[in-house]
Image (cartoon, helix red, strand yellow):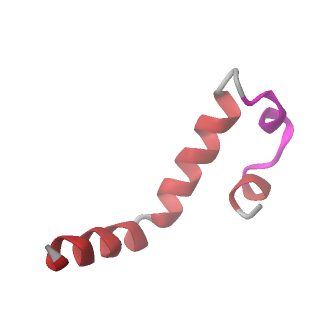
Amino acid sequence: MRIYTRKYVELAEQHAEKMAKRWAMDVQNNVKTPTYKKLDEQKIIFQ
């Protein structure tokens, strides 16, 4: 089980920037989070 955990962490680290950008885009486009529409992507990611 530890191998799977380690691999998952490695994948998350390798793709962290892409994941953060996608999350920021999703939050900006979600009707339930209207405040984020006005914020810059970098500000959302590094809040």
Question: In which image quadrant can residue 11 be found?
Answer: bottom left
Which residue: 52% across, 63% down?
17
The location of residue 15, given as percent across then percent down, is: 41, 64
Towards the viewer: 1 or 26: 1
Which residue: 39% across, 67% down?
12
- Seen in the image, is 10 located left or right of residue 38? left
The answer to whether 6 is drawn above or below residue 11 in the figure is below
Quadrant occupied by the C terminus: bottom right
Which residue: 53% across, 46% down?
22
The answer to whether 3 is drawn above or below residue 47 in the figure is below
Q: Magenta span: helix, strand or loop, mainly? A: helix
Q: Is residue 37 magenta?
A: yes
Which residue: 48% across, 57% down?
18
The location of residue 13, given as percent across then percent down, is: 42, 73
The answer to whether 35 is drawn above or below residue 32 in the figure is below
Towards the viewer: 45 or 8: 8
Q: Which residues are magenta?
A: 33-41
The location of residue 37, given as percent across then percent down, is: 79, 33
The location of residue 6, given as percent across then percent down, is: 25, 78
- Seen in the image, is 25 located left or right of residue 6? right
Quadrant occupied by the N terminus: bottom left
Question: In which image quadrant can residue 9 be found?
Answer: bottom left
Number of numbered labels in the structure image: 0
Q: Is residue 26 magenta?
A: no
In the displayed image of the protein, which residue is found farthest to the front? 1
